[in-house]
Image: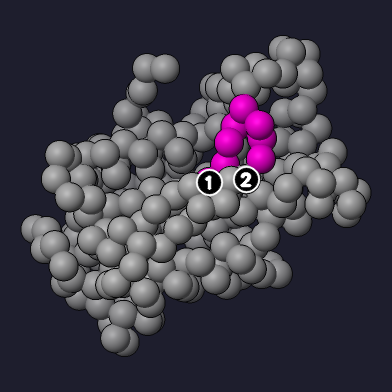
Amino acid sequence: MIPRPGGRHAAGGGRRRDRRRRPDRPGGGSDTLSRVTPTFEDLLHRARTLGRDGRRALLGIAGSPGAGKSTLAGELVRALNGTGEPWAAHVPMDGFHLADAELDRLGRRDRKGAPDTFDAAGYAALLRRLREETYGDVVYAPGFERVLEQPVAGAVPVPPTARLVVTEGNYLLLDTGAWARVRSQLDEVWFCELDEEERVRRLVARHVEFGKRRDEAAAWVARSDGPNAELVARTRHRADLVVPASAVPRVRR
C-alpha cells in the first residue's frame, strides 16, 4: 500500500460510500454547483482526498462527447502520479464499446456511441472488481483504439498500488438499464461542461483527426453524437461536481 496525503474516510467497509454533500469541497453537491468555480488545483486536492485511508477509491468523470473528459482524467492521473510508483490509474469507459462486427449483427453500427452500443453490464462488473480486488494481481481493463475505432482487450493495466481509479465516459450518470449499476460503484462523479459551440467544434475536429472527411464528421456529430449529448446533458444534476472548461488543462497535440 502506498499512502498519499489528503483524504476521506470510507463508509460501510468501503462498499457503500457516504454521498452527503460536503460544504468544504468546492462545488460539492447540486445545491452549490453554481456557487464556486473550481480550478485544476482544487480538483487535484479533491481527487487526492478520495484515497486517503488506504482503500481504493473510484472517481467518475462524465459529460457529453467532446467535453474534455479524457483530457481531465489523463491530466489528473499524470499530476497525481508524478514520477513515483503509480497511485492513480485511468480506465476509460470506451473500452466497453461493442465491436463493429457485433454492432453489425445487432443493426446498431450507424448509432455507434449510443448507450445500447456498449457492454454496460461488463463495465459495471469491472468497476466492482476494481473496488474489491485492491491488492495482489494487476487488473486489466480494455482500452479503445481511436484510429481503428475498436475496443482492445487487456490494454489498460491497473496495478495493485493504485489507490485511485479515474474512469470517464458519457453515461456514468445514466439511471436506466445496466447503466444504473455504474453509479453505485463510484465514490464521486464529476460532470465536464463546455460551451456547446466549442464542444461541437472540438468533436468534429477529433473525428477528422482520426480519419473522417470534414463533411462526414459534421454529419456524424449531428446524427449520432448530438442525440447522445442531449441524453448526457439531462444527467448533469446527478453529478457531485460540475467542472467548467476553465478547470481542464489545455493539452497541445
Residue underneath mark 2: 151
Which quadrant is the N terminus positioned in? bottom left
Outermost top residue? 214
Quarter of the view holding residue 9: bottom left
Residue at 56% x, 27% y: name it. Answer: 199
Q: Nearer the viewer, residue 238 or 180?
A: 180
Query: First in sequence: mark 2 or mark 1?
Result: 1
Residue at 50% x, 61% y: name it. Answer: 238
Image coordinates of residue 245 in percent, x first then y, are 40, 31
Q: Nearer the viewer, residue 69 or 245?
A: 69
Residue type marked 2: Pro
Which quadrant is the C terminus positioned in? top left
Q: Nearer the viewer, residue 76 or 20?
A: 76
Mark 2, other Cα within 10 Å: few <14 / some 14–19 / many ≥20? some
Q: Which residues are magenta?
A: 143-150
**Residue 148 lies within the magenta run:** yes
Residue at 29% x, 42% y: name it. Answer: 76
Image coordinates of residue 11 in percent, x first then y, are 28, 82
Residue underneath mark 1: 143
Q: Nearer the viewer, residue 153 or 64?
A: 153
**Residue 183 lies within the magenta run:** no
Residue type marked 1: Gly
- Is residue 213 toward the left or the right of residue 24 in the image? right
